[in-house]
Amino acid sequence: MTSFDVIIIGGGHNGLTAATLLGKSGRKVLLLEAAGNVGGALHGYEFHPGFRAGGLAHIVNRLDPDVAKLIGLQAELPEILPTVALSETGMPAVLRGAYGERTDGVTAAEAVRFSELREKLLFQAGILKRFLKRRPPEIGAVTAGDMAAFASAGWNMIRRGREEGRDFLRMLLMNVADVADEYLTDDRLKGLIAFDATLGIHLGPRSPTSLLGLHYRLTGEAGGAAGAQFMPRGGVSALAAAFEKAAVSAGVTIRTGTSVTRILADRGETKGIALASGEEISAPVVVSAIHPQMTFLTLVDAAELSTGFLRAVKNIRSKGNVARLDLALERVPEFSGVLPEDHRGRLVIARSIDHVENAFNPAKYGEFSEDPVMEITVPSLADPSLAPAGAATLSALVQFAPYQLGEGWEAGKPRFQKVVLDVLERHAPGIGKFVLGSSLMTPADIEACYHMSGGHWHHGELQTDQLLVNRPVNAACRYSTPLKGLYLASAGSHPGGGISGLPGFLAAQSILAGERR
Amino acid sequence: MGSRMKRYDVVMIGGGHNGLVAACYLQRAGLDVVVLEKNDWVGGAATSRELTPGFTYSNCSYVCSLFRPEIMRDLELPEHGLQVVAYEGGAVFTRDGDYLASYRDHDSHRREFARWSKRDAEAYDRYARDVTRQCRFIQPLLMRTAPDPFSFRPRDISELIHLARKFGEFTPSQIAQTLRFWTMSISDFLDEYFETDVIKAYLALSGIIGTALGPMSPGTAYVLLHHYMGEVDGSVGAWGYARGGMGAVSRALASSFQAWGGTIRIGADVEKVLTRNGEAAGVVLCGGEEVLGKLVVSNADVKRTFLKLVDEQDLPDTFLHRVRHFKMRGSSGKLNIALDSLPEFPALPAGSSCIRGDLHFTDSVERMERAYDDWKAGRWSADPFVDMVIPTQLDPTMAPPGKHFMSCFVQYCPPKVEGRDWTDADRDAFAETVISQIAEYSPGFRERIVHMEVRTPREIEEEVGLTEGNIFQGELTFDQLLFNRPVPGYAQYRSPVKGLYLCGSSTHPGGGVMGAPGRNAAAEILRDLRLGTKHMSQAHDVI
């Protein structure tokens, strides 16, 4: 039986981040990935002969600066891409700079209102942000560091006066629709923030706590600018390569195409893992960078865990709502009223708050929306290698498409694809004629393809009751688990999903801190 | 002339139950209080009226459980005629002709669950334990003024420390569970325990009554608690009927108030709050009469008070902005029905006690949520959720012998119909939706109807004065609870106008016939006047 200091299960970007950090500290690290290559949701796929998708994630907006440094991403300021709120009837509204430092296509008065709201939300996100890069505090054993974080959050809350502080506590758990109505009048902008707040989350804009989704987006940054988004040179796949390279140079042994079937444990202590081939590899520390439910419900012997813990794990809500559409296009698409260079940004179809809310309603009952909302990018503009010369790829994240469709996805998929193409046609007339091929991945497909339970890219709903000390469950919220030596490092852990690398980063840090103690 | 006019110590705007509770406490503390009520009867939404001969209607609120026992005792309400009759039972009718019965006794209830699912019956023990634990934490909060986290005054800081200590009595994992509970939807919460649709639907109803939220909205698990905190005769979570209808609560309060020398003026509609040098000095009634007072307390909701009764110029901009954006969207309607005989429900076994409690027809959470989708779109629910009771089975005083009064609380019912005002035709169509639903489960129901009163948010606003017909004087969402209710920085019953206070359900801890807002407001006023609160018993932990 071979042995390592640490075994990492899952070669997604969080697994790679944890591996790199632990490898750098001098440990002998083995990373095991079931797929043929590492990178997880950053890894691309060919969906039509000659056309590739960069990865499930199609834009980067929250890569942590320390993680970026760890993987050697250029320190130079990336180009910040615009967000375009498409309109069916007239001109789109465009947010330029970091989440709309400047707005185009709206009235001067509306631009002022948007900038006031943006300022307020960024301020509030700034308070929340300090909790994202630390382990969740341990209730009952709050450390000096935690106290300092609370004190500094408290200080920041009143830094701009009591009224801003009061507004923070008032708005924290509000719904995004009421906030949008309080500040804005333009349906395109209201629809956009309603969409951004609920993307990837099973909430409608009128559901209480939905504003938190927008706060979460605004805690992200690019090149030091909060709320900004960019595309790495060479596209998302280039990022996957950077993560892999960093791990390799940290001395991590990577084995792809290797499925872990069991985490070996004895009387509450982790001993190693067993592979599908029957091979066993021992290590005192195992880091699971895959979905927490897969970790505990399929890899660990139930006898090693308590009933209460298992019940809590089973209760994690993790059913995806987002489908991914890839189109192979004969030429670069043109959306009505959108400047050619703005096609490199993010195009959002969400006409109004009601549009988003009505798109959400069917998802509650296991139906897909007949008039979905979506965000679109044209990945081949950043990475021409994705499509043959002159041609283009289009990627759309479409919601709401429930993981479990009442009628079953086999029957529903062709119908849903038609619905999505009809919406696209309304905003980019004639686009249907240029479609050479397409691929629609429902949450069920995403689950199968990327090994994410429920096809949920956050590895668990990013809702208030599944955050901080309750992410993924209270007994495993600080990366260590009730099974000694087993750690969690996926997006299912604090602070959640998106290409940030933070769950992996924090998990590795807490392993290192634990050993020092 | 001003010098000859009587000047009261306190002028109370509105004689709802909270206004009366506050007035009672203030009068007992030695102040001279006048209550001004626009209607010809007191009680606000806790009222009984005879709209057809021989029948007493509980027009708005219809069951009594949340009313704080401490207040009942302090104000000697039983001596003033209040009697609460606990009731047993209830049923949810399912579409396939079966029913889920409910019983007050935990074990009987559990046996009924077992008839549907053994697993759910087992989960019920766990569920009851977990919810009771949450009640235990929330209950002591009700009868305290919410601390202001930004005031930095010693009193607020010590109150925050008190609450933190209270929280510290729980284990870390219980605290984590509490944080989840407070922000979850009732639907998600119930999914963690139960598998049977009708059981979940039955338990979910307390999470949505009176709120403009569906069972799948985060925060509705907390609303559940809001309805569970009640107690009748020391039995937590139990419900009862006030003998003689809900007006009996108000009559007892009025009688207690008058016994201590308080003045009630009915038919006195307040038009404006009078201010002198930025301080409240009394009110002007419609018709021009002035009623002067050293202090003015408003039992009206926060919007009515500050957007209609107070001059905008007396209020800071931020405050006004927040009052305007305070959410009080009506979500419920009501049918009050006089029946010439007891309706029959063939699904129930003959002689079942279940008919004496709440009866419902919504057998799945999905149907409830779809009913909410209609409300979001500005329509009343096509398949509404109805909470129906026939109190005359236990309280024969409300109808002639052999005849019955039935109260149907209906959700959801929007404050406007697709953006426009309600018409009488809309109201009739709304009533028809409800009646036909009942008739489906109770053959011959229509023929028993002698008289009916239909109330949409329009009627509730017109008569009771609740803005948009919101029965809680403001939604119970996080941004409008505790130190945020009704306005951050003004959650301690005081207002930007010196000498003007709020005491209605717009303030902490919110709606329901609970009396806590009125009591807490009285406590703050007495504190400002440096009068003791000896005659006010402190909150006790009951569980």
Image: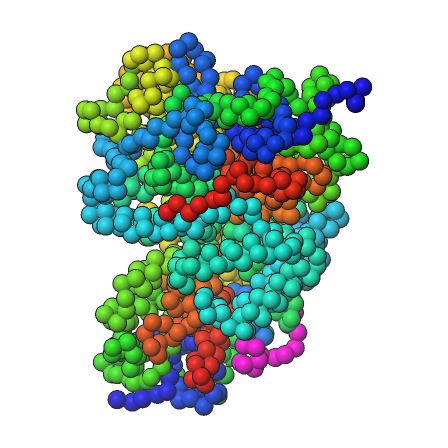
Q: Which residues are magenta?
A: A66-79
Which one is in front, B489 or B203? B489
Q: Is residue B425 above or below residue B528?
A: above
Q: Can residue A477 be seen in the rendering of this structure?
A: yes
Side of A12 where B157 appears, left or right: right
Which one is in front, A339 or B30? B30
* Residue found 40% across the figure and 34% down from its top: B65
* Residue found 30% across the figure and 21% down from its top: B393
List x then y, in percent, for residue A263.
Answer: 29, 76
Which one is in front, B426 or A267? A267
List x then y, in percent, for residue B124.
Answer: 27, 47
Point out the image quarter for the C terminus of chain A. bottom left
Give the main secondary structure, helix, strand or loop, of the magenta stretch.
Answer: loop
List x then y, in percent, for residue B140.
Answer: 46, 47
- Work out which residue is located at the far top of the displayed protein and give it: B53
Side of B497 where B353 appears, left or right: left
Residue B3 painted magenta: no
List x then y, in percent, for residue B202.
Answer: 32, 38
Residue A68 painted magenta: yes
Q: Is residue A10 above or below residue B309?
A: below
Q: Is residue A322 above or below residue A90?
A: below
